[in-house]
């Protein structure tokens, strides 16, 4: 029997009555909420937050390995406009070609003003999902160094 971990359990700082993370979860390719994805399986990170302010809000998600080391990050403002307006905002962050190998993955999240002067809500090292097994048969299911896999072509260099 395992205890349910809520995203609020990982909160490290927040500004009351501003903007706060309500929920963070993963959905598989079928749109089902899950805590386990297979190597090479597309998935979506879902972030829901409740804004009590009218000012624009930017968001960042940092995906980390089980040792709390950052692997990659994405900001809401990278490709779209910050959220504007009071209310609940839910965003899907598709990871179409995940390079993640077997293991546990965490996420750190921040909600902040676009100029990064105000950090409304900060969550550190929330255990988001595990990668186990293989979805893509081209993904080698063996023991190698590192958390990431991507195909690398070796070429014989005849000039050596």
Image (cartoon, helix red, strand yellow):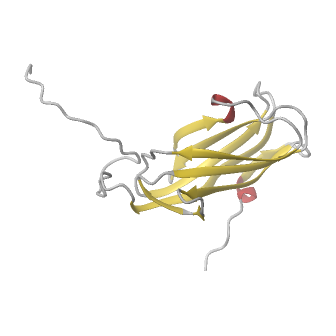
Based on the displayed image, in which of its 4 quarters is residue 30 positioned?
A: bottom right
In-image side of 80 versus 130 (left or right): right
Quadrant of the drawing holding the N terminus:
bottom right
Q: Which of 122 and 97 is in front in this view?
A: 97
Q: Which residue is drawn at 82% across and 45% down?
A: 14
x%, y% of residue 154?
A: 20, 34
In the rendered image, the residue lying farthest to the front is: 30
Q: Residue at x 31, y 41 (%)?
A: 151
Q: Which residue is drawn at 71% across and 41% down?
A: 110
Quadrant of the drawing holding the C terminus:
top left
x%, y% of residue 49?
A: 78, 48
Q: Which of 90 and 115 is in front in this view?
A: 90
In the rendered image, the residue lying farthest to the top is: 159
User: Considering only vertical position in the picture, is 65 above or below 120?
Assistant: below
Q: Nearer the viewer, residue 82 or 123?
A: 82
x%, y% of residue 124?
A: 66, 48
Q: Which residue is drawn at 36% across and 45% down?
A: 149
Based on the displayed image, in which of its 4 quarters is residue 118 positioned?
A: top right
In-image side of 128 versus 113 (left or right): left
Based on the displayed image, in which of its 4 quarters is residue 156 positioned?
A: top left
x%, y% of residue 159?
A: 9, 19
Q: Which of 39 and 94 is in front in this view?
A: 94
In-image side of 160 versus 122 (left or right): left
User: Considering only vertical position in the picture, is 33 above or below 157?
Assistant: below
> How many tags in the picture?
0
User: Considering only vertical position in the picture, is 152 above or below 36?
Assistant: above
């Amino acid at each position: 029997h395992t205890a349910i971990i809520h995203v609020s359990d990982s909160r490290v700082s927040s500004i009351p009555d501003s903007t706060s993370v309500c929920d963070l979860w993963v959905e598989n390719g079928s749109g089902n909420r899950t805590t386990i994805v297979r190597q090479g399986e597309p998935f979506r990170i879902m972030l829901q937050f409740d804004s009590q302010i009218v000012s624009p809000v930017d968001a960042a998600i940092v995906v980390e390995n089980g040792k709390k080391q950052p692997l990659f990050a994405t900001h809401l403002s990278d490709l779209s406009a910050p959220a504007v307006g009071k209310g609940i905002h839910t965003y899907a962050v598709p990871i179409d070609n995940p390079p993640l190998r077997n293991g546990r993955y965490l996420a750190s999240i921040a909600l902040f003003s676009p100029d990064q002067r105000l950090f409304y809500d900060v969550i550190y090292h929330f255990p988001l999902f595990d990668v186990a097994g293989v979805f893509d048969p081209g993904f080698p299911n063996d023991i190698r160094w590192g958390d990431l896999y991507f195909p690398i072509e070796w070429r014989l260099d005849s000039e050596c």
